[in-house]
Image (cartoon, rainbow, N blue to C red):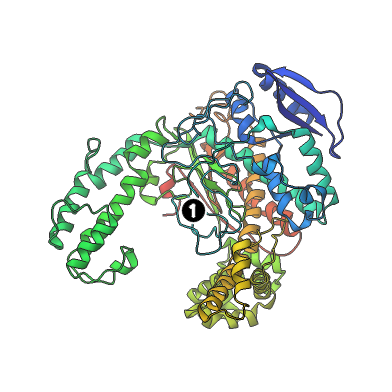
Amino acid sequence: MHTVVSAEGSGIGLRSVSDSGAPAGEQRVVEASGLAREVAADEATHVRWAWDDTNNWYPALLADGVRVDRAHDLRLAHAVLRASVLSARTALAEAGLTAWDRLAPVPPPGGPTAAALVRPDRHPGSEPLFDLGEVAAPTTSGRAAGNRRRPDAGPGSERRTDESDGYDQPGGRHDHGRDDEYLGAGDLDPAAELTAQLLAIKDSTGPGRLRLLLAAESAGALAAAEMHHAGLPWRGDIHDQILTDALGPRPRPGARPAKLEDLAHRIRAAIDAPPTLNPDSHPDLLRAMEYAGVGARSLRKWELEKLDHPVIAPLLEYKGLYRLYTANGWNWLDTWAPDGRFRMEYVVGGVVTGRWASTGGGALQLPHNVRRAVVADPGWTFVVADAAQLEPRVLAALARDERMAAAGRSKDGANTDMYAGIVATGAVDSREHAKVGMLGAMYGGTTGVSAQVLPRLARAFPQAIDLVERAARAGERGEKVTTRLGRSSPLPGESWAATQGSAFDEDAGADVQSRARSQTRSWGRFTRNFVVQGTAAEWALCWIASIRRRLWALGEIDTGSTPGLAPAPFDRRPHLVFFLHDEVVVHAPAAFAEAVAQEVRAAAEEAGRLLFGDFPVDFPLSVAVTESYADAKD
């Protein structure tokens, strides 16, 4: 049974809908102040809450100490069902664009990147949205704030940002800015949309797969809201000391830290530049370096390291410290962890492959040198787990390549390094070659060592290599590819088709044909990886959903134990506090540490069974119990 939550005038509407989409009784309307009480009472009936966007409703419930077990996020589900080849022949997918296609994701209320839009039609009790400053606001046409879906943004058109891992192309482009209009929940009918979605699942060619995907996606949205609510423990005094040791004392506003200022003087001196040269201005610095005969064509680290000039050492040191200062400096500390908790703002499904994005704070790129500030509460500890070589294991299971799966299977109770296992098959002669070759197979490497070893891998693991090759060919033809559970890639778009078509014109020149071939290969590399990375994201979502359920079932610490500093309902329970693609961090009472580690491992096994049934593939974890996040992988 579903209960649809919606804004109804000055109150909140609660409407029961059966699993087939049929209304089940009259709608109840409750006051906003009584919503948490109603939800807490109905949780005992194992209801699944259906709402337009999890961040529109769940943060307020958490603030009242209420956790929900299951939900159906209509915005996330709509995006999947509209694009999936499994639901392509359904009424929902074949309909024209609706308000749901333009609905923007809602950032957590009150956070640093909450949009500067005070919405009169938001449900009662919701917090206003605050100014974003330089951070991207939600867009009406995109999947995520700062992560607008651009199906026509082909490979090579995207740019890296602090919130991307670099493997989210195409369609994962980060376009900063705000559309002129904003369509909100007040313009939608959640009950009608739920009925349409349930019918689309029923009429699809893979109802079981889509049902699992949407449940996992919605569970991820609940987990993301809970991690924002609880926050990652963060010691501001330790962070300040890290910055002071590296940069010198905190500078006055508008001034550089002492260490950066000293390095700026050394850079100017090494190239005989005037004192007005600003090393933060890349064009000015490159011109000065060219005038001095340094020979640098860019300021990329790998290129600078090849040069022999007195400016290189201070410049590389400056770049590293400047990155720390701008990405995780004192301003970051004041903005993102002012109360001893880093409350990251995840965007579930914010990347076209299904991976999570972030609207700010660098949640997806926490450098090791600041992780020393991540310290568990007194009497508590962290359980840190990450999946080893997740994507090649997913590829083996997707292709049902038993020999490749066997290369990564645990032996005698010990986890096996999959790349070492590939070497043991005789396919390649070193672990490095195995790793480079597999990455080339999944990401489209066509040169160097990758090109040399790929034919050998194809002979050793023909099913796995054939799967990614077929995905690449489909992309080159401008077709969709689909993950294990049914998330489909976007079509290339009009600009791609126009370029391809122009290559067949009678008067098409060599440059036009070359551009078309390059574009074709680039899109093929995208679809080649989409099926693997997207399915790995689905495994991770199922892992998170299982961990979340298992942690809650462990119960609370006894009343005589030290509660944590996280707000209720997690002050006495182990809970998730961080997630990064294939890594999770659980904050737990010390007495629960071993039980938590066991449940996290069991959740990984469950995720594998949910996606791949009884196919014999292992998803081993590296698990550490530690009071400091920085020590988890030392």
Disc 1, SS = loop
Is residue 70 positioned above or below 11 on the image? below
Kindly tell me whether residue 411 is visible in this rendering.
no
Q: Amino acid at mark 1?
A: Ser
Q: Name the spot of residue 92 as percent of width and height, x first.
A: 78, 47
Residue pictured at 37% horizontal, 46% vertical = 327
Q: Name the spot of residue 140 as percent of width and height, x first.
A: 59, 41
**Going by the image, does 307 lie left or right of 133?**
left
**Going by the image, does 119 lie left or right of 485?**
left
Residue sitting farthest toward the front: 507
**Going by the image, does 615 lie left or right of 511?**
right
Q: Name the spot of residue 269 as percent of width and height, x first.
A: 12, 59
Q: Residues within 10 Å of mark 1 (few under 14, many from 20)?
A: many
Kindly tell me whether residue 163 is visible in this rendering.
yes
Name the image quarter holding the C terminus. Answer: bottom left
Q: Name the spot of residue 373 as percent of width and height, x first.
A: 38, 41
Pointer 1: what residue?
A: 164
In which quadrant of the rendered view does residue 122 lie?
top right
Name the foreground residue: 629 vs 240. 240
